[in-house]
Amino acid sequence: MNHIFYHENLKYQIYNPRMNAKLNFLVSVLILIVMLSNAKPVHVLSVKSPDGKITLQLENDAQIKWSVSYEGIAVIAPSKISLTLNDGEVLGSNAVISSCKTLAVNNTIVTPIYKKQSIINQYNELTINFKGDYGLILRAYNDGVAYRFFIKRPGGITIKNEEANFNFMNDHDALIPYVRDIRNNDIYMSAFEALYEHIKLSGFKKDTLAFTPVLVDLGNNRKAAIMEADLEDYPGMFLKRNNTAGLGFHGDFAHYPLKEKKGGFSDMNYVVTERAGYIAKTISTRNLPWRVALISADDKELANNDMVQKLASPCRISDISWIKPGKVAWDWWNDWNISKVEFKAGINTATYKYYADFASANKLQYIILDEGWSEQTDMMKIVPAINLQEIIDHAKQKNVDVILWASWYAIDQRMDEAFAKYSKMGVKGFKIDFLDRDDQKMVASCYKIAQKAAQYHLLIDFHGMYKPTGLQRTFPNIINFEGVKGMENEKWTTDDVPGYDVTLPFIRMLAGPLDYTPGAMRNAIKPDFRPSNSNPMSQGTRCHQLAMYVVFEAPLAMLADSPTAYMKEQECTDFISKIPTTFDETVVLDGKVGEHVAIARKKSDTWYVGAMTNWDAREINLDMSFLGSGIYEAELFRDGVNADKDATDYKREIIKLSSKDKLKIVLGNGGGWIARIYPVKN
């Protein structure tokens, strides 16, 4: 017989609705003490969200299972969880509870480099200690749940494997990013870039990995996103089809790399040649990463979720005043293709001084020197065509700073020397590329880079990187991540990019910011698009590109096209330069996964609104009630009436608005809409 007790939103042993809450709690504690003293197993434990809608339940029988329900309807069916140690001990098998502790939290987390100034952190928590010096922490928020193992043992520990399952009762539809671009025949080496495939859970391809977040459609507008958070000194979680349960996912983890060699793209990073029989060697008093299930009743809730920020470890940098978000003039995507100049454009000093002049004239904070400024595998050897100090000094005179590209291999070889030298020269950050893994060694390296870079006041943009899991809160000098099939792929792909663009805010952006690198000034409708290296174009309209600067979260935002292209389109460039990269407030106005999205973000007293659609034209009604009192003026860019034939066609307008307005906007095929809304001064 299973007994359950209830205290506020925390359950354990016995429940009697006739008893008041205080007496209920006292009786339950007494029963708990008696049961523990008699060493009888406790079978059911649970914790509810503060609003009472979500229940996270734990069954402690021969094997621990977790499950989740929303308003009484199953979301996660009972799913086994455990840790297997190298000596064969299974933490979670025949577990005996030694103590439990409940906690209700409602506080505010300040988030200065984010899409809002602060977030509400409200949850109920149940901590379960098991005999054997380990346990589980269960948390229930109003927008999802999370659990994590913890260990409290002396010395070190080797974890052979972790069992993390996410089972479902029904054969739901899902959106899955499969691992496609496998490197060096190692399924765990990937750039973490993939379009989302629409599947039934039963259709998850056997022996294939997906990376998180993934999204499951529960029906009735409800969605569940599976992901992880606070990943540190531990491998990231991939997902495989759960062949045992049938419908759902099974966590899969890269084993520790034993041997590596130089290889990969242009032979400039490490590839794993042999992996160990375990996934992690680590300290044995620690918390493991959070396993997370987000739950939404409306797609708009997904596009404004803060779960990773809430679950991440707090900031470890005492003074973050030197961390400056901003926009970057980027060279690589446009192939250094500038014209009407008296020098040969390319990877040379004159070109980068020109980029700095362009950035200064358009109030951009940074330029970046992408690959080629140094030898590929030795970043201490600058190529003869580059006078780096001259570029840095010239840019500084124009109030522009410099970021350098480097492969992870090159950073790993000479990190201390490189960070010391280049920070002294005046470099403000690094874009680190080709990590291509999230095994324990790579995850640990990311934290080491973050900490070391912070010592030298250096920003880091992790490119060729696994999805973020909270490092951006712990070390806010980690100012952006790739882990997205962004604009660089549009140089070569004919995939459905606009559809992907309006899927990202509901899935990938749950994990954190994304280095999508928007800003194409050559825009194409579907039949006109073609791949090009030196004159790359984007799919969809000009306004679709402009809207990305609001819709996509990116504290460090690239301008992908060339100075020449932007100067030809100065009206658009001026508008891009006015858009901040961090915000004080975010409101999602409308959206449906894979179809369209409209987001409003506020900085100081000015609102920025961006809307995007897939290849389907549509009308959206925007409720402007988020505006404060008074009259506002909006500078807006909308798709032109001929954007269905010429994707560069747009119309700029100035209109008056108030919070009482319902604004109908028209989005063309692959279209967009963007506005800067500011109060009218009396």
Image (tube, rainbow, N blue to C red):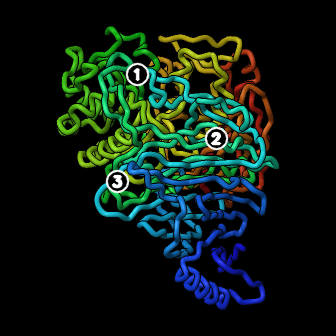
Camera-side mark, 3 or 1 = 3
Return the disc, 3 or 1, that comes first in the chain's sequence. Answer: 3
Question: How far separated are the C-alphas under marks 2 and 1?
Answer: 44 Å
Q: Is residue 359 above or below residue 158?
A: above
In the rendered structure, find residue 331 and report the number of the disc placed on it. Answer: 1
Q: Residue at x 58, y 81 (%)?
A: 35
51 or 400: nearer the eye? 51
Q: Position of residue 144 (x, y in %)?
A: 64, 57
Q: Up-down: is 677 above or below 351?
A: below
Which residue is under mark 3? 157
Amino acid type at image mark 1: Asp
Q: Nearer the viewer, mark 2 or mark 1?
A: 2
Where is 581 relative to 111, above or below?
above
Where, quadrant-wise, is the C terminus in this rendering? bottom right
| Disc 3 element | strand
Q: Residue furthest right?
A: 220
Q: Is residue 563 left or right of residue 34?
A: left
Q: Nearer the viewer, residue 550 or 272?
A: 272
- Which quadrant is home to the N terminus? bottom right
* Cα–Cα gap, marks 3 and 2: 27 Å
Residue at 38 percent of width and 42 percent of height: 440
Instruction: Give coordinates of residue 534: x percent, y percent.
Output: 47, 11
Q: Residue at x 33, y 25 (%)?
A: 269
Which residue carries the number 2 mark?
242
